[in-house]
Image (cartoon, grey):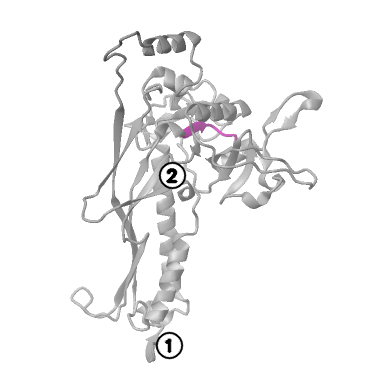
Amino acid sequence: MATNAYGNGGTTATVDTASYGTTRGNTVVHFYDRAGVKAANRVNLYGQFADRKSMPKKMGKTFKISKFLHVYDRALNDTEFSEKGYLSARSVDEVNTALTNASLAEGAKDVNKRSIQKITMETSVARYGEMIDYTDEVGLFSEDTMQVRYREELGELANSRMEDLIQLDMLATPTVMRAGSAGSLLEMDEDSIVSYDLIRKAVRKLVRNRAKKNTSLVTGSTKIDTRTIDKSFYAIIGANVKGDLELLTRGAGSEKEFVYVPSHKYASAGTLVEGEVGAMHEVRFIESEAAVVYAGAVGTIGAVPPQNYAGELSITGAIDLGSVTPADRGNFDVFPILFPTQGCFATVGLKGQGKIKFNSKSPEIVENANPYGTNGFFSYNFFYAGIILEEEKLLKVLVTASA
């Protein structure tokens, strides 16, 4: 291994690149850490839709946030809200009754009183971290640039953990739609595949729930075979769902057309977000390699029909299988389509605390735990908390997919 000399403020610090983790030559160590931080920001598919909240230090691990509900809206726990949203589809009789109840007679006193409801949501900060340990022989006998390699691997692992945390927290939303006639995961089958009508219904539900569209209009172009894309919601999908979207059509005969527009056919493709692959009916789709699946024992459509499955979604968005073994479930894989609209979700960070922290210790450091100077390590750790701010505006649509 070569020995390199680096200048530092007028003095020279000698750095032996075989001594991984050494505290000498802080310029080089900073370069290594920067490689890890860059890797920790490799993918931001889910994180790009999360607002940022900060929590002061020395205030405990619980973060709380409150909001007021409008007195003129349907209550979130009403059956009518689930079917119709906040204000849409009100009958004439309902509106007339409400206006009558708000009228004032001559000389009216304390009548028509209303109350304002305030709700408080909370989440707890948790810490996550992993490490790689190694011996001094890595530096003695390896020709690889292991300083950078270790940090990059840990950085990418941390990035994956962060994306998974955000994804699972978003999937914990209680606002759920299922394809076909399925009333639960038990009933998901080959008729629960994604369809054009299902996406239309999802858009209608979000509009009724007063969700804000993520994008503005993609205007026209003079280029041949490009499309204007309307104001849209974003939806995160996996590769299986994308494959079915690409085959969807509407109309019949000479009027039959494919309804999915690949992103390369947008009139202006310069407005794409990370991972965007196409659009359909006021929805722009983002493909995620890491999109999770509620896994059945058999798999996707074309396998054995479902039988004896007894699992259901838990509050964390995972399937609670109880004592049922995979061999007994026999249900199809179920794939979520996630609609993260504006302001519906946030992550919480500690003020003054970086997104991720890398640590290292060289085998050269001799102490009680390392008496022979043969063992070192690299590690990362970060704090995380996620919170659904407006559950009605964070929609999860569950579908099956073709094999």
Q: Residue at x 45, y 9 (%)?
A: 96
Along the line of sight, the residue nearer the viewer: 271 or 366: 271
Q: Which residue is mark 2?
A: 167
Q: How many marks?
A: 2
Q: Residue furthest bottom?
A: 11
Measuring from the top left, give residue 305's x and y in whole percent. 52, 26
Along the line of sight, the residue nearer the viewer: 109 or 186: 109
User: In the rendered image, is residue 224 in sight?
Assistant: yes
2 and 1 marks in contact (CB < 8 Å):
no
Kind of residue at badge 1: Tyr
The image quadrant that residue 376 belongs to is bottom left
Residue bounds of the magenta highlight: 394-402
Q: Residue furthest front?
A: 107
* Disc sitting over residue 6 in the figure: 1
Measuring from the top left, give residue 55's x and y in whole percent. 29, 51
Magenta-drawn stretch contains 339: no
Measuring from the top left, give residue 103's x and y in whole percent. 38, 11
Kind of residue at badge 2: Gln
Majority secondary structure of magenta residues: strand
